Image (cartoon, grey):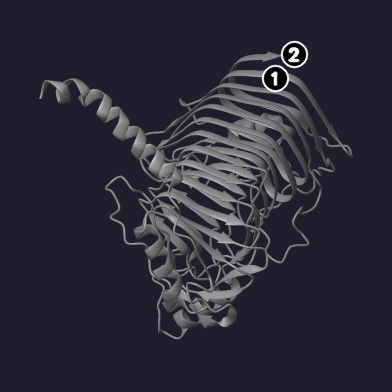
Amino acid sequence: MNIWKGAYPHCRLLFASLATWLAMTAVAYDRTSAQAGLVGDGQTLNTTALQQAIDRISAKGGGRLTLTPGTYLTGCLQLRSGVELHLEKGAVLLGSSNPDHYQPLDIDAAGNDQRNDNSLLALIVAHQARNIRLTGEGTIDGNGLALALAIDSLHHAGVRPDPHYNQRRMRPSETARPKLLFLSDCEHISMTGLHLRNSACWGLSFDQCRHMQLRNLDILNRAYWNNDGIDLTDCRDVAISQCCINSADDGICLKSYHVDGECSDISISKCNIATSASAVKFGTASWGAFRHVNIDSIRVRDTFRSAIAIESVDGATIDNISVSHIHATNTGNPIFIRLGHRAGQKPGCISNVTISDISVEVPFGRPDINYDLRGPEPDFFHNPLPSVISGIPGHPIRNLTIRNAQLVYPGRASKSMAYVPLSRVKDIPENIDHYPEFTMFGELPAWGFFIRHVEGLHLENIDMRTVEPDYREPYVFYDVSNVSTE
């Protein structure tokens, strides 16, 4: 007994090392599409066979399911822990156009979830899964236009009524249309190399996920309305890099639907974005917090709204944000930062934001004029609008730095189109509870920057010009204190 007692710590270390070695050298339970009984003819529905293969691989301790070249038609699939879905070049995972082939992810929403029945539908879903990967050079295609039109037709036929149908814009609501991918409360997620296409709603949506890497993804999501590229909701430890995004709605959007949640420790770098909305955006859902976010080396083109939009309108704290090396051409607005109070018990706060080394060219006309899906215009006459930075009375944006900015505006402002002189700056509406957008205040008396309710503003090396003359001022400040310029 004394011998075993003395040897116990060493045996425990030995067994721990052996377990680690076995885990590292274990043969993964891999399967190909043929071994899983899949049919890649684009006509045969593979949902059951695909789900069985995913479940079996996870039950065996993890491994890879490889789709070889072919088109694999499927309804909703649920990823499991330890599973890698690998699509070889020429392999297409094609979403069914039948709405009955999609079921909402079965999760219990916490009491602090403010999504208000936001859709849990997607072609690929997962909940509380670990160590999941989607890789390869193949394509995941949501078949979104056909699917959305089928949902629309069934609503009007009374077969599948959509209680939130958008009557004003004549389309099914976001709650009725499946996303391409929706992962909830998952961790250790990796997505690399894939071509991602044609969702009926948002593209890649992650809710309260942790430890994620999204790299070298090619996202084309313009099949229908509300087609964001990548959405992160209260996610932590995320790296997005070298992605190409062309989306009908926001390119990369950070959201917070959970009042005690936060988007934090997020890096977005070396991405190319084109969109009929904003390229990189915080909000509009902004209940919890956004902290320690670094955005670097982003190229933006043909974008209708803002190159960068930072919004807290539901009580969120936004703090320690760095945006650098943004190059945007044919983009409607360089910078939009808004602290408002649309919802939540009290206004949030925006502080310690640095924007540096940016270059933006704003056209006179619509940047997205050649797209089939175009962002809705404001319903008022206006001259070209400036960058907008605005808090609300008693709640200023604090400690904002903008340095090394080259901004080219179109000019051509006409007093006969709309005219707001500086003497009427106090009459510009606050719109405290309105949806945040750089057009939300109407015509403005500046062509470069309209800055209001800010405490602590540092402007350094700002180079702004207009292509043609503009009668308005380059800067308009209202209720701005502690300003320094260099």
In the displayed structure image, the side of residue 16 where residue 336 appears, left or right = right
Quadrant location of residue 202? bottom right
Q: Is residue 129 above or below residue 267?
A: below
Q: Decide: few, some or many residues near mark 2? Use Cα within 10 Å; few <14, some 14-19, many ≥20.
A: few
Q: Which residue is mark 2?
A: 486
* Residue drawn at the location 55% of the way across and 46% of the way down: 253
* Residue drawn at the location 42% of the way across and 52% of the way down: 82
In this view of the protein, can residue 117 be seen by the observer? no
What percent of the width, then of the height, locates residue 467?
A: 88, 39
Pick whichever, 36 or 329, lies toward us: 36
Q: Is residue 153 above or below residue 314?
A: below
Amino acid type assigned to the residue bearing label 1 in the image: Leu
What percent of the width, then of the height, locates residue 247?
A: 65, 56
Locate the C terminus and report the quarter of the image it occupies: top right
Q: Which residue is mark 1?
A: 459
What percent of the width, then of the height, locates residue 319?
A: 50, 27
What percent of the width, then of the height, locates residue 232?
A: 50, 46
Q: Earlier in the sequence, mark 1 or mark 2?
A: 1
Q: Decide: few, some or many residues near mark 1? Use Cα within 10 Å; few <14, some 14-19, many ≥20.
A: some
